């Protein structure tokens, strides 16, 4: 059965950034402001369906009802966020870096009505005749809506910070020189505390920036200048951006930026060519456009979708956007996973809609604020090519972040920390992949005389991780099941992503203090969760050799932890441990040492070497003592990359 396409004029003098405030308190509100659907704005809330976490978002966007007649331009459809991680639905990729605040890989909802501004007047559009919310929107757009205060910051670079980004750029240039790839888009994460409503942030920022593709949905407020995809009928277009500079003439003459740009235009031609008719792909010449204080090179790549190809096929051929991955695309995504220190969420994915009337339209989620709990973060980066420099790329990333930040009065604290070169240290990811979250979570609990020690701490940590990562709760009877095991030894509890728990008890193996500590660089560390997947840890232990213990170091030289234990070092009468800033596991015995007077302070390799005593502590044991130091920097040739 075909649906009607109803359009009713509304009387209002509100600008789109003002009308956004009328969505406050609604369920699943969204706002698209800028060039969407020919220009203006689209607002909506109260969807008739929200896509489930386990459903295929690409298939959903292609499954739209038929519409008969009417003069609505959009009418309704699927609206929301397609995160960067959806690339895993298309390609086999290594596990991502740690996620400080994990978000679902997609958030989509289906709306049977929208409110649209065409640049001159407002319209109520619906795929249902006599929609009950028409009267509500008439009243809303006839009223004025107050903004509420919000605050954040100052923003600082997360994880290894600016030093980590410079190190990642240098490593990427080396990989390019070795022929591994031509270009990779590397980003850093700028993060701050936040108080307020993301809706107010978006309304304020959109009024100042006037983004080409502004979008608000489920804790994501994007001020993107870049169109990812536009499909109207069988016609498909993409406007990839690559190449950035403050001066338009210098940008147009820059050989480096031209090289970046042509690679990504070719990549988008290839992606579209996978689903478009032969001979239909065309790419226009680059043009210079200005957005929020910086200039970009932009081209339009177009094609005609071949017969039988759907929006699902189009998205599987193109996600995530080529301009924010690199070339060759799959290898660039592997390099991103290896060199960046935090997982991308909505950032560098896509936002927009699929409508049975207007077709498909998506932006690239850049210049994008993301909100969760009391935090806000903003990704910023750029394309790395053979002649990139770490300082130049850092400056470009911060320049891109400046527009969104200043639009709402937020500031960036450069927070420059000392950087210890890790260039000659072995890379952990040359020996194996990061732990796979799909294999679940682990807790190892000490059991003495039938009593599980620190059980509250272990179960609390497990419950927090299970909810944050998988959205599940630990079994209600888990405590009773553990208590019933009794005996002595080490109890290994593995929690699967579906919330089921399994147990394995074993004697506590003797472990002597290692003769030396061997550092391995792992951008972002292992994160704040204890993974059941121990393959990387085992590979590092084997590589370190007998009598040695591998320790993890971030790209800025910050010492994090051992593969199985927290690190504590004594300086005189003081005990110090690296801070639990999301890059390392907050161990249970470490917490007890902090309660007894140990302090959190940054530790680098020189400080570790100079310590009077070093301890490795876990729930089962503490080993170490005076004289434990690194006696091998393992400065031989790096392992061959896979």
Image (cartoon, rainbow, N blue to C red):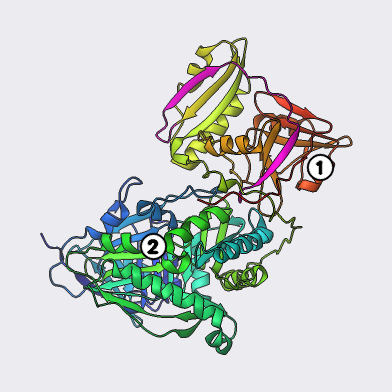
- Badge 2 density bin: few <14, some 14–19, many ≥20, Cα 10 Å: many
Q: Is residue 515 magenta?
A: yes
Q: Nearer the viewer, residue 111 or 318?
A: 318
- Residue highlighted by disc 2: 30
Residue range corresponding to the magenta coloring: 496-524
Q: Are marks 2 and 1 in contact (CB under 8 Å)?
A: no
Asked where in the image residue 90 lies, by quadrant, the reply is bottom left
Q: Position of residue 443 (x, y in %)?
A: 55, 28
Is 191 drawn above or below residue 621 in the view shown?
below
Q: Position of residue 632 (x, y in %)?
A: 75, 42
- Residue highlighted by disc 1: 609
Q: Nearer the viewer, residue 594 or 272?
A: 272
Q: Secondary structure at mark 1?
A: helix
Q: Nearer the viewer, residue 296 or 144?
A: 296
- Badge 1 density bin: few <14, some 14–19, many ≥20, Cα 10 Å: some
Quarter of the N terminus within the rendering? bottom left
* Foreground: disc 2 or disc 1: 1
Q: Position of residue 578 (x, y in %)?
A: 72, 43
Q: CA distance from mark 2 to mark 1?
A: 53 Å
Numbered mark located on residue 591 in the image: none
Number of labelled discs?
Answer: 2
**Would residue 488 be seen by someone viewing this image from the given angle?**
yes
Q: Is residue 501 magenta?
A: yes
Q: Secondary structure at mark 2?
A: strand
Q: From the viewer's perspective, is 48 left or right of 637?
A: left
Residue under the image location 45 percent in, 36 percent down: 439
Q: Position of residue 311 (x, y in %)?
A: 26, 63
């Amino acid at each position: 059965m075909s649906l009607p396409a109803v359009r009713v004029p509304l009387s209002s003098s509100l600008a789109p950034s003002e009308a956004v405030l009328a969505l406050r308190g609604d369920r699943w509100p969204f706002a698209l402001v800028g060039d969407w659907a020919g220009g203006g704005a689209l607002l909506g809330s109260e969807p008739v369906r929200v896509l489930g976490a386990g459903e295929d978002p690409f298939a959903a966007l292609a499954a739209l009802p038929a519409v008969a007649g009417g003069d609505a331009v959009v009418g309704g459809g699927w609206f929301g966020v397609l995160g960067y991680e959806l690339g895993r639905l298309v390609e086999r990729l290594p596990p991502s870096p740690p996620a400080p605040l994990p978000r679902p890989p997609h958030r989509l909802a289906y709306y049977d009505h929208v409110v649209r501004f065409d640049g001159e007047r407002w319209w109520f559009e619906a795929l249902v005749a006599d929609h009950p919310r028409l009267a509500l929107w008439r009243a809303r757009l006839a009223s004025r809506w107050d903004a509420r205060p919000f605050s954040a910051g100052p923003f600082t670079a997360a994880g290894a910070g600016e030093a980590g980004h410079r190190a990642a750029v240098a490593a990427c240039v080396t990989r390019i020189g070795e022929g591994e790839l031509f270009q990779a888009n590397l980003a850093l994460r700028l993060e701050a505390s936040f108080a307020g409503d993301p809706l107010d942030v978006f309304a304020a920022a959109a009024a100042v920036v006037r983004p080409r593709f502004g979008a608000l949905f489920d804790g994501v407020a994007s001020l993107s200048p870049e169109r990812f995809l536009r499909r109207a009928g069988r016609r498909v277009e993409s406007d990839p951006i690559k190449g950035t500079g403050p001066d338009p003439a210098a940008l147009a003459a820059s050989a480096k930026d031209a090289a970046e740009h042509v690679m990504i235009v070719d990549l988008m031609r290839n992606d579209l060519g996978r689903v478009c008719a032969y001979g239909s792909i065309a790419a226009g010449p680059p043009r210079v456009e200005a957005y929020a204080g910086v200039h970009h090179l932009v081209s339009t790549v177009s094609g005609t979708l071949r017969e039988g190809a759907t929006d699902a096929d189009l998205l599987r051929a193109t996600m995530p956007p080529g301009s924010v991955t690199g070339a060759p695309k799959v290898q660039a995504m592997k390099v991103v996973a290896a060199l960046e220190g935090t997982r991308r969420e909505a950032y560098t994915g896509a936002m927009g809609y699929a409508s049975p009337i207007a077709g498909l339209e998506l932006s690239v989620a850049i210049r994008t604020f993301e909100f969760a709990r009391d935090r806000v973060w903003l990704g910023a980066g750029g394309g790395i090519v053979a002649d990139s420099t770490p300082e130049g790329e850092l400056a470009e990333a911060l320049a891109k972040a400046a527009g969104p930040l200043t639009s709402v009065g937020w500031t960036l604290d450069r927070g420059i920390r000392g950087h210890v070169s890790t260039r000659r240290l072995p890379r952990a990811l040359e020996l194996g992949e990061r732990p796979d979250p799909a294999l679940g979570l682990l807790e190892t609990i000490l059991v003495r005389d039938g009593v599980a020690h620190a059980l509250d701490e272990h179960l609390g940590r497990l419950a927090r991780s299970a909810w944050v990562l998988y959205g599940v709760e630990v079994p209600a009877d888990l405590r009773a099941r553990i208590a019933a095991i009794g005996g002595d030894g080490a109890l290994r509890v593995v929690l699967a992503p579906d919330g089921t728990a399994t147990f394995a008890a074993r004697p506590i193996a003797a472990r002597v203090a290692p003769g030396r500590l061997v550092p391995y660089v792992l951008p972002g560390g292992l994160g704040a969760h204890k993974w059941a997947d121990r393959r990387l840890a085992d590979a590092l232990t084997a590589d370190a050799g007998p009598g040695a213990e591998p320790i993890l170091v971030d790209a800025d030289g910050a010492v994090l932890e051992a593969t199985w234990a927290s690190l504590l070092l004594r300086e005189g009468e003081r005990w110090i441990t690296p801070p639990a800033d999301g890059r390392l596991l907050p161990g249970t015995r470490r917490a007890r040492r902090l309660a007894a007077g140990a302090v959190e302070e940054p530790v680098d390799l020189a400080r570790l070497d100079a310590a009077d005593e070093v301890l490795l502590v876990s729930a089962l044991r503490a080993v170490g003592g005076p004289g434990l130091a690194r006696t091998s920097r393992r400065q031989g040739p790096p392992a061959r990359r896979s």
